[in-house]
Image: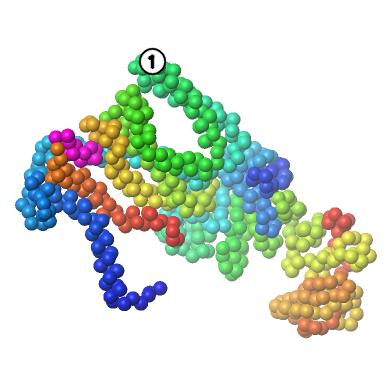
Amino acid sequence: MARRQSMSRRLGVTALAWAVGLLIFFPILWTFLTSFKTELDAFAYPPKFLFFHWTLENYVEVQDRSNYLLFAYNSIVLSIGANVIGLVIAVPAAWSMAFAPTVVPERALTRRLYIVILAAIAVAAVLLWLVGDARSDWRVYGPVAAVATLPIIYWIMTRRTTDVMMWMLSTKMMPGVGVLVPIFLWFRDLHLLDSRFGIGLMLLLMNLPLLIWMLYTYFKEIPVDILEAARMDGASLMNEIIHVLTPMAVPGIASTMLLAVILSWNEAFWTLNLTTHDAAPLTAFIASYSAPEGLFWAKLSAASTLAIAPILVLGWFSQKQLVRGLTFGAVK
Amino acid sequence: MGSIELKGVRKSFGAVNIINGVDLKIEDGEFAVFVGPSGCGKSTLLRLIAGLEDLTSGAVLINGLDVSDVGPAQRGLAMVFQSYALYPHMSVRNNIAFALKMAKQPPAIIEQKVQKAAGILNLSDYLDRKPRQLSGGQRQRVAIGRAIVREPKAFLFDEPLSNLDAALRVQMRVEIGELHNALKTTMIYVTHDQVEAMTMANKIVVLDKGSVMQVGSPLELYNRPNGLFVAGFIGSPKMNLIRGEVAARRGATTIGIRPEHADISTTAGEWQASVRVAEHLGSDTFLHAESDVVGPLTIRLAGEAPIAPGDRIFVTPRPAHVHRFGEDGRRMA
């Protein structure tokens, strides 16, 4: 319903909205402007807003000192690659949670138990193979750890879907730094430090709960009748997911993917701790300019601008899709 | 072509029993209708046959083969859903062709079959439209078209007409009947509407609380209901069920008289009653009367009858049409 508002009130609200908007945007704008200043102008006091000697030398120097394209390439490969693989795992997972939730699986219990035992043996074998004879104590700890997880996996597989979903969400509740040391040691022993595979795996595992949760809520909106119709039409599970579910969930999948890519792109804790050069994305590129030899504000700003520009452009062009995705299902 | 047999079929969700042991045989080419009040388990029974639900115990046989552990995709049955369940992102053509594509049929054959089905169902002009651009009746036809191109062993219909308006429902009822005559394929049809059941079925299966109450042709159920439930459920308006002394005099606990099986007189008869409501439909007149002896009565008279509310009438049941039920609610010989 349209409400009547006085002109002054409307002006006031508009001004306030702009003020808040500019306040939030200001750091980005300031970074952008600083990237065109000389190092001297960058920390001049009083600060120079627009009237300074505009220069591109920071960009040139940043490109000279480090290979922006390598970092950018890593960022793209990691954030897109990890989430594409994540999607391949998350779509079937969300399907099973939305359309085949676990309900008192008495008859299936024994079968599941066998699967879990086989999986544990497989995990133990893989661990042994990967570690090899690098650390002899792994030969003991690896299989013990794998077998110890057996009751946990069994518990998860026999719980109702809602419990599993809460468990997945709970993994997002613990601060990453809490597991930094064990994960760092694992990565070191498995030779995953500074490898694209290693950090990609980390980003994938971080985003997987989010991917599954978001897809689950989108899938819940899809009438199960349509999937059953596909089953009656002779579609295999794979065909049902590829030809019926996925096309119907495209808006949801797209916005989930977009959000996940943005989160991965900006992820700085694990990328900084687990990579140095070969697999380092743009976050590490920025961080390398707050180096022990001193802070170079202008170069840091140039690096930041280069790092956030691609994702900013992506976000700008997909904002419609993003907003639609986030409110999808709120209205029919 | 297919016969379908259920052997001791049970289904429970947790502790709740939905289907309590159903044994049933549907012959090849039959038009069977599952009918019953809502919550009686008729849709669940259909979904068990389709394979969309797992059996708790018992077996489902198609053409004599046990398919209890076979998935819905492999059972060779086609289903039409109440909500139509069309694929919203596909054109009508692709909706109809989907099953054939899944069966990896060559494109030329698919096109030919789609055209044929569209011809039968008057959909030829709409093949390139999306489901959202169609009316309710057209969507229903697409759902049926999707089923017939597969040449299934049997068709399963889950209340397919309940989303249509009354006029369209009558028309689609006739079309489905014609389709059955033309294809001669086994059909199982679920409805809560006993008029649909009576008009379409060769065989009606009346269900209540997860059990089969009676199986028979429409007229068998009408003429010889085996118990109080079927007597009250089949027929419209409902059969008058009378207990007490009047029934005892005929050697029964309850007697049933259909509204159309009683004669009316203004001068003499068995039970005196006063008319509360008279419904004049032109072809029929329905009287809702209150008798001092037997309580409320519904009477159906053919054609127009000059009777108004408040009139005193005499009602005499036709002896040949009095149904007698015993203490346990079952029909007495």
Q: Work out whether residue A73 can be spotted.
A: no
Residue shown at the point (85%, 54%) measured from the top left: B328
Image mark 1: chain: A
Q: Work out whether residue B86 can be spotted.
A: yes
Quadrant into which the C terminus of chain B falls: bottom right
Query: Residue type at mark 1?
Result: Ser
Task: State the residue in front, B160 or B311.
Answer: B311
Residue A291 within the segment the image draws in magenta: yes
Residue A261 within the segment the image draws in magenta: no
Residue most extreme to the left: A53
Q: Is residue A66 above or below residue B133?
A: above
Q: Which residue is mark 1?
A: A136
Instruction: Count the labels in the image.
Output: 1
- Magenta segment: A281-293
Residue A316 image position (x, y, % from top left): 26, 54
Q: Is residue B259 above or below residue A20?
A: below
In the image, is A13 to the left or to the right of A112?
left
Residue shown at the point (69%, 43%) measured from the top left: B9
Q: Is residue B204 above or below residue A295?
A: below
Residue B287 image position (x, y, % from top left): 77, 76
Residue most extreme to the front: A45
In the image, is A56 to the left or to the right of B131?
left
